[in-house]
Amino acid sequence: MKTTKNLLMILSVIIASFQMSIGANQIYTSDEIKKILDETTEICNNDNGLLWGCSLDVPILFVDELNGIIYSNKNSTSLKLEMDKDIFKGELPEFIQVKKGPVKIGERNWALIPLPLPEDKIERQCIILHEAFHCLQPQLELKPMPYQNNHMDEMEARVWLKLEWRALNLALESEGDNRKQAIVDAICFRKYRRAIFSNCNGCENRFEIHEGMAEYTANKICRTKTNFKEHLQRKLDGLWNSPSFVNCFAYYSGPVYAYLLDETDINWRNQLGAKDDIALIVQSAYNLSLPFDVFMEAEERSVLYSGAKIMGEELDREIAL
């Protein structure tokens, strides 16, 4: 029986590797790229600049690094692209560093996106719109100064972040006073963590604005409200046991706080700044008062969110390192 299980495990690894190899070597046709770009254009036209006051229809550069091919919805003299099936196509120039994110070519920011993309339409469009938003952040004055959040690998930071996440997840599922209480709990846990790591507030805020708002924007535009909430809950499950939270925590915290803001009547996006603490904006939007002793409240309320279990998980992780 054990031998059979081992053989099945080896076979599954071989199949997975083969599938990954196929995906990595996939060559897109111009028709396939045009279909994807048409999807993006339709989504951008439906938004019509309503979310942030400007269109997300930015220059997009799909890069097939393995085959040395680039595809785009725009042209540039620097790229020397040729029209093919109503899109632009050419050879990958040496001056382009293949890394997902905004890249300056000429006078414009281009959303550089390595291929292949997910087969699911919503998943691939979320990737595209996430990077498109990064291109707009400078003009929205939401491009932050550099940040680093290495403290998020510390055990205590992880414990209080997980408690904040648990409270935010409850806020997503709740309404009325129950939602307000969950938000208060999340902010208390957040403040407790930040009191321990007192020099890191600004870096956490900038990460949540930089990546969190890009992630929020993509999912807000590409998904229905119900699907967006379900996606956030799946995101939490996926992040929960991440070996490191340093470069990923904002991908949940930022969109959840933004989602909760959208449940209010305030026009928060026009007032958002690159250094803002989005949790404090949520507190104001819901007209919430924090307890007199935030830290005692955080310790007492942590029991309701399985604080001891979370501490045990993180102790086990710490010992295993």
Image (cartoon, helix red, strand yellow):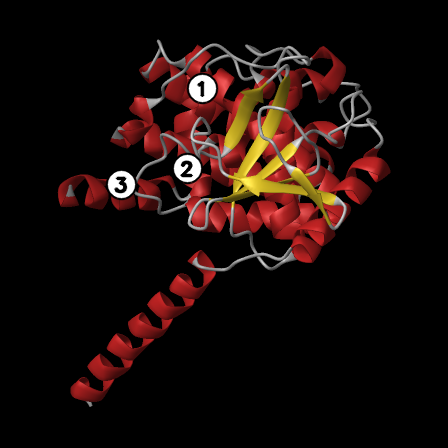
Q: Earlier in the sequence, mark 1 or mark 3?
A: 1
- Which residue is located at x 33 percent, y 15 percent? 197
Q: Amino acid at mark 1?
A: Glu
Q: Disc 3 on helix, strand or loop? A: helix
Q: Label 1, secondary structure: give it.
A: helix
Residue 126 x, y percent position in the rendering: 63, 43
Residue 80 is drawn in which quadrant? top right
Q: Residue at x 60, y 16 (%)?
A: 280
Q: Which residue is mark 1?
A: 204
Q: Position of residue 148 (x, y in %)?
A: 36, 19
Q: Report the mark closest to the observer, 1 or 2.
A: 1
Q: Confirm whether residue 216 shows in the render.
A: no
Label 2 element class:
helix
Residue 274 in the image: state x and y as whole percent: 58, 12
The nearer-to-camera label among 1 and 3 is 1
The residue nearer to you, when weighing 298 against 57, is 57
Q: Can you tell which quarter of the image residue 14 is in?
A: bottom left
- The label on residue 314 is 3
What is the CA distance from the residue labelled 1 to the residue labelled 2?
15 Å
Sequence-first tag of 2 and 3: 2
* Picture layout, residue 245 above or below residue 272: below
Crowding around mark 1 (Cα neighbors within 10 Å: few <14, some 14 to 19, many 20+) is many
Q: Position of residue 297 (x, y in %)?
A: 45, 23
User: Could you tell me if the residues under marks 2 and 3 are in contact, i.e. CB atoms within 8 Å?
Assistant: yes
Q: Amino acid at mark 3?
A: Glu
Instruction: Measure how far apart labels 2 and 3 are at the Cα level.
Output: 10 Å
Q: Nearer the viewer, residue 177 or 232?
A: 232
Q: Quadrant of residue 203?
A: top left
